[in-house]
Image (spheres, coloured by chain):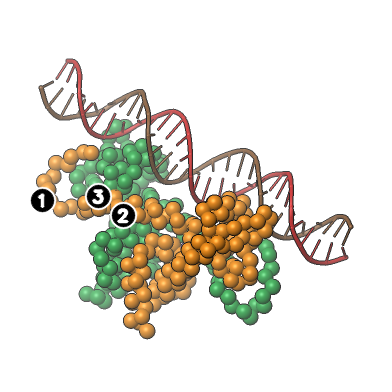
Chain colours: A green, B orange, C red, D brown
DNA sequence: CCTATAATATAGCAATGGCTATAAGTGCGA
DNA sequence: TCGCACTTATAGCCATTGCTATATTATAGG
């Protein structure tokens, strides 16, 4: 790597490289599980609401095409989150239900936290849909603390 | 789409479909620009710190391989964010500097906000690296308000 | 019971974001 | 000046996440 000529005493805008790389790695990791979390959460909600989760409904709510959902469901089945019967709706495994519940709880807390900060319902809903996947346990705890202090 | 047999009076865990789809679309959109924002921000920081941004340094700080960076830089150049001279470092265009500055400001606010909530420096750093890309203008404003009220 | 419609499956394509291996260019020090 | 080490470019691979077009299956009404 290139050696920068500036003396070590000068502290620029840059943080330590090893420190920074860990943040980026962690973020890339969260990005990889983002879709899975949204799928199982949505499937759980659809089942809770209507008794079943069908591809067309998942596709409609995610705003993607049905074959996109079909392919993702295969991955979720291969990963052990759902069970599929051909030409039928999907069902969550124990592992899937566990992840769905954790995701929904975290999602709720993030969205409620944003609302508590005075953010509008619509913006809180939109922002929480993305932010939720990048919130660590420590940060989630801080959000919960804030919410309970607000009463 | 499938018609659910439950009466409309029953309000389940599910929000309106058109409402939900907009959140997912918005999130997918933010995800598309996430990497671009991190690249231009990092390039700006490297230039500010050492006068130049070299592929090897970008790769080392992002934790990816150098050819991964090379390919992305071509995209950034094609999109008008940077200028490249073969076998030389990269430079930001006016458009690139503009995006870099906006990204860095937003990143700073998010990280400072998490710190103000009592979150540890390391967790704030890691979480902010992901959260920053999913924070709307309205939410950013709310974070700023909280920070100024904190003193 | 048959058929039309709805839902699911499959094939094939593209863009994105990663990787390794290797070729080619730059530039510094001896 | 020239060679070697560093840096950049390129080729080729894979996984992911989207799409359209089309085939197949399920099922409800007549
Ligand atoms: Mn969610
Ligand atoms: Mn989400
Ligand atoms: Mn950033
Ligand atoms: Mn980031």
Relative image position of residue C30 (x, y in whole percent) = 88, 65
Q: Which one is closest to the eye, mark 1 or mark 2?
A: 2
The part of the image, by quadrant, that contains residue B123 is bottom left
> Is A58 displayed left or right of B54 in the figure?
left
Q: Which mark is residue B9?
A: 1
Ligand 2 within 8 A of label 2's CB? yes
Question: Can you identify the residue that label 2 sits on?
Answer: B23
Label 2 and label 3: CA atoms lie apart by 9 Å
In the rendered image, which quarter contains the N terminus of chain B? top left
Relative image position of residue A19 (x, y in whole percent) = 55, 68
Which badge, 2 or 3, is on the more N-terminal residue? 3
Query: Marks 1 and 2: CB-CB under 8 Å?
Result: no
Q: Is residue B79 visible?
A: yes
Which badge, 1 or 3, is on the more N-terminal residue? 1
Dot 3 falls on which chain?
B
Relative image position of residue D24 (x, y in whole percent) = 33, 24
Question: Can you identify the residue that label 3 sits on?
Answer: B18
Label 1 and label 3: CA atoms lie apart by 18 Å
| Identity of the residue drawn at 34% across and 40% down | A65
| Identity of the residue drawn at 56% across and 62% down | B92
Element assignment for label 1: loop
Relative image position of residue A55 (x, y in whole percent) = 29, 39
Which residue in the rendered view is the most extreme toward the front?
B94
1 and 2 marks on the same chain: yes
1 and 3 marks on the same chain: yes
The part of the image, by quadrant, that contains residue A120 is bottom left
């Amino acid at each position: 790597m290139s050696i920068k000529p500036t003396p070590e005493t000068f502290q620029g805008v840059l943080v330590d490289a090893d420190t920074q790389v860990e943040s980026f790695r962690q973020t890339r990791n969260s990005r990889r599980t983002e879709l899975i979390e949204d799928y199982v959460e949505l499937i759980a909600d659809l089942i809770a609401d209507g008794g079943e989760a069908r591809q067309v409904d998942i596709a409609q709510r995610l705003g993607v095409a049905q074959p996109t959902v079909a392919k993702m469901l295969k991955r979720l089945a291969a990963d052990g989150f759902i069970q599929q019967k051909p030409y039928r709706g999907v069902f969550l495994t124990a592992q899937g239900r566990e992840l769905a519940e954790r995701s929904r709880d975290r999602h709720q807390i993030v969205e409620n936290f944003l609302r508590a900060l005075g953010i509008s319902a619509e913006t809180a809903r939109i922002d929480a849909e993305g932010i939720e996947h990048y919130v660590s346990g420590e940060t989630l705890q801080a959000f919960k603390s804030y919410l309970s202090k607000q009463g």
